[in-house]
Amino acid sequence: MHSFLKLVGPIVLLLFGLWSCSLEEVAPYKQVNVVDPLPLAKEYYELEKPRQVNSSFRIQAEHEIFPFWAGARSHADGRILIVPAHRKLQVRYEAGYLRRFVFELDASGKVLRGGMLELAGKDSKFLLQNEELLVEGFLAGVKSKDLTYLWSDFVARPLDGTQADGRVVALQREGGAKSLLDAEALRTEFCIDWYWVYSFNGVVVFEVYSHTTCGSASCDTNAQDACLDDGTGGGGDDYVFIDNPCDLMEVLSKNFDFKKKFQELSHNTGLNYETGYFFSKNGTSYNFTYIQGLANDPEINFSISGPIDGFIHSHYTGTYSLFSGVDIKTMYTTYQYGMMNNPLSFSIGVTTPQGNSYMVGIEDISMFLNFSSANFSSQSSFNSLEEFYENNFIAFTVYGKTEEEARELAFFETFANSGLQLFKGNSDFSQFKRITKNNYQVNSQNCN
């Protein structure tokens, strides 16, 4: 007998969200005669900026961004100049954020290019400690999948928003770039929420909240205290940025409510119906909503009215000892309907009559979408996947594997190249270790 969740209900398009290479891949610049880049960069800026007179919507809404020349730092023997990019505005950043004016020069001192580079992800401490290396890497064409990059001109018009995984990012206010309010009102009287909007092949795939700006007329004449945004912020000690399943498991396994709900579900595996919760992140906590299936019916039909961050549920005797194919398909349905807050911090969980608990998260969104499109888009392709899953399970039991081992191995065979990571919890749900397959053996390991 199969066991699964099924998602039904209204479609509300609202997606949130974060972000492969290593820093060691950045090739160092060759030694050259040192040239003071500061006056050259100033000259380039004063020449180029007037040509960019049509300010972007961001500048109209957020105030002009200006170079703080006194904080400029030369790097790579004068070939790179990094200048703090300030503005007079009150801002609250959610995750790590760094904004700099960057100038690249050749050996003779000629400025090859200049613009504004914005980096998001991780935390502000990481960005500041690795600032020079990250900037040098970007100029060399090296981008980390763990960060978001946006290169713009001096008036914040985007020039390059391509990420390491091929997605393209733009920074937009809530509701898009258009507003019924005039630019002066936006600039001086209202707070605006800004989002990183990620698209792939021209289609928006998800959004991630970036920051909130609040204009004030007093900031026009005051560049100190709350009115000064120096281009850094976010990701403090109380904030954990989640951009991969391992970080997500660490956060969830430390959450009291999550462990309590999972414990409750583990006691429900003796029932003759499924129970569960879908949950949404609320700041540093989670909100849980109870769902329940019908007696002797191995599924839960549930509806949601807004984006969520995942769901957990129980299986009962006679159903799957791990995730069913429909469980995984429901993840894709959630994404299709615009109900997945952030794919990289979305997860589903199950507790089984065998006394086990599992979680699965998305490690690679592109692989997940490709796999899902190939296997979940038609009933015939999904039936083939389900049959393959069951045949693998039977084969492994014939080879002498236990039901638990056979189902885990069948899962790896069936969902290979799906972009998913599988985790197995301990008895009190305080730790979920990643499990992998190696030569038809299942191994568990810590993420870090």
Image (spheres, rainbow, N blue to C red):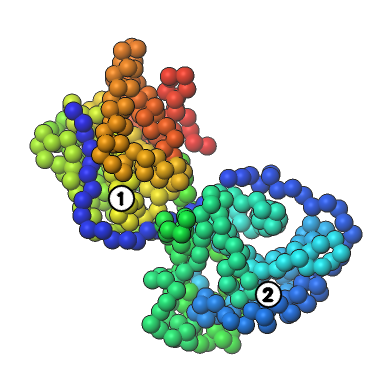
Graded by Cα atoms within 10 Å as few (under 14), some (14 to 19) or many (20 or more), the crowding at tag 2 reads many
- The residue at 47%/55% (across/down) is 200
**Residue at left 61%, top 51%?**
143
Dot 1, how many residues are within 10 Å of its Cα: few (below 14), some (14-19), or many (20+)?
many
Which of the two discs, 2 and 1, labels the residue nearer the N terminus?
Answer: 2
Position of 148 with respect to 412 (left or right) is right
Where is residue 217 drawn, in percent x and y? 51, 87
Spot occupied by residue 379 in the image (x, y as percentages of width and height): 25, 39
Is residue 377 among what the camera can see? yes
Label pair 2/1, CB-CB below 8 angstroms? no
Q: Is residue 426 left or right of residue 61?
A: left
Location of residue 144 with respect to 323 vertically, above or below: below
Q: Is residue 35 left or right of residue 243?
A: right
Say which quadrant the N terminus sits in. Answer: top left
Identify which residue, 218 or 177, lies in the foreground: 177
x then y, percent, for residue 37: 81, 68
Residue shown at the point (58%, 82%) measured from the top left = 54
**Residue at position x 32%, y 17% from top?**
395
Amino acid at circle 2: Pro
> What amino acid type should be assigned to the residue bearing mark 1?
Thr
Q: Which of marks 2 and 1 is in front?
A: 1
Identify residue for label 1: 334
- Residue that extends furthest to the left in the rendered view of this protein: 295
Q: Which of 161 and 437 is in front in this view?
A: 161
> Of residues 423 and 206, which is closer to you in this image?
206
Does 343 sit above or below residue 202?
A: above
Q: Mark 2 points at which residue?
A: 67
